[in-house]
Image (cartoon, rainbow, N blue to C red):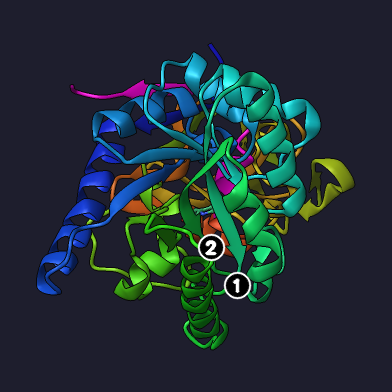
Amino acid sequence: MRHTVARVDLDALRRNVRAIRRLLDDGARASRRQAPGIVGVVKANAYGHGAAAVARVLEDEHVAMLACADVDEGVALREAGARGPILVFGALGVSDLDGIFSHALTPTISSPWAGRALAAAAAERGVVLGCHVKVDTGMNRLGLRHDNLRRTLPAILGASSLRVDAIYTHFATADDPESEHFARQQQHFAEACAAAASLGLPSVMTHAANSAALLRDERVWFDAVRPGLLLYGVVPPPLATTLDLEPALTLHSRIVAVKGVRAGEGVGYGQAFRADGPRTVAIVPAGYADGVDWRLGNRGVVLVRGRRMPIVGRVSMDMLTIDVTGLDVSPGDEVVLLGRQGRERLDAREVAATIGSIPWELLCRLGARIEREYCSDS
Ligand SMILES: *Cc1c(COP(=O)(O)O)cnc(C)c1O
């Protein structure tokens, strides 16, 4: 077995789902309405956590739906045993359409073309296909333009082989407390929903909130929320929450060698670290091929013996070097790249910030080479 392992605590994941649900239940009760459901976002291999195992926990916790990025991910979820509805967010290619029918996926119609293609494919198979319509309220990415539904929606609503089960949108700036765009998108979505109703869309499921929007504004909870990052126990920066969440994934390795470096000598590629005196370095078998970002070279830290020790020199493909001068370490000692050790803690938000990235990227780039070790008491 390799030394570098991602541990995924499925109980932590389960507790995170329950904490989010408590927030939703409490908020809904206070405003006397029905609590929204949870659409559990498991795209990109469940943000690196492993889609199959995560999907099992989410379905066990009775999420309303799972959601993934494309048809292939949806097919993989079904093959892993997911039984509930699976929403596919992404745009559909021609070759994709088969999987929707063969694996009972719920596609998103985000363009007139997608509507026509799905209507034709469903008619050809003699079925009525349930789908969600995505409205672009200002992200200017996928979706039917909010101010143009009169032109685009009637063909979709009129297709007898399609059934629109939901209408949704996606926010571009919900994580930015300074941005007015979030409010503008809400306004556009309200207008779009009214326009859709006037065009004959019956009252259907409505959803909009990613993790940040879910935390920021109860008014966008609608019938369901779509948390991704939050499920995994990471709060979208720069937001804070009193929710009791914990990162489900931690990343561990072990020291494989320790050596002395003399004053003036360099370490690793480009000799990017130069010892200003006698130093002790330890080699850790985790590199950028494992998803440990190259930019952490000479910048990041890891935990060893409960202390933060700096990554020195460049991160290589398969290993990195840390300065452990003054610490009594030997091969076999545990190194934590994400997670806790003793009283110290290193989380995805902090590591991402170190390199000018975001926790979403950090998590979903964890390499396929890293073994996922699942733990759960239940
Ligand atoms: C990824 C995604 C989400 C989840 O976003 P988080 O910020 O991780 O909560 C929700 N909705 C859509 C359409 C997405 O693509």
Measured in 3D between alpha carbons, the distance from the residue under mark 2 to the one under mark 1, in whole angstroms, is 7 Å
Residue 184 shown left or right of residue 343 in the figure: right
Q: Would you name the residue on which mark 2 appears?
A: 169
Residue range corresponding to the magenta coloring? 360-378
Quadrant for residue 61, please give it. Answer: top left
Is ligand 1 within 8 Å of the beta carbon of the residue shown at mark 1?
no
For mark 2, give the secondary structure: loop
Q: Would you name the residue on which mark 1 appears?
A: 137
Residue at the (69%, 28%) spot, across then down = 121
Residue at the (59%, 29%) spot, across then down = 73
Q: Do the residues labelled 2 and 1 touch (CB within 8 Å)?
A: yes
For mark 1, give the secondary structure: loop
Foreground residue, 362 or 39? 39
Amino acid type for the residue under numbered disc 2: Thr
Amino acid type for the residue under numbered disc 1: Thr
Foreground residue, 326 or 70? 70
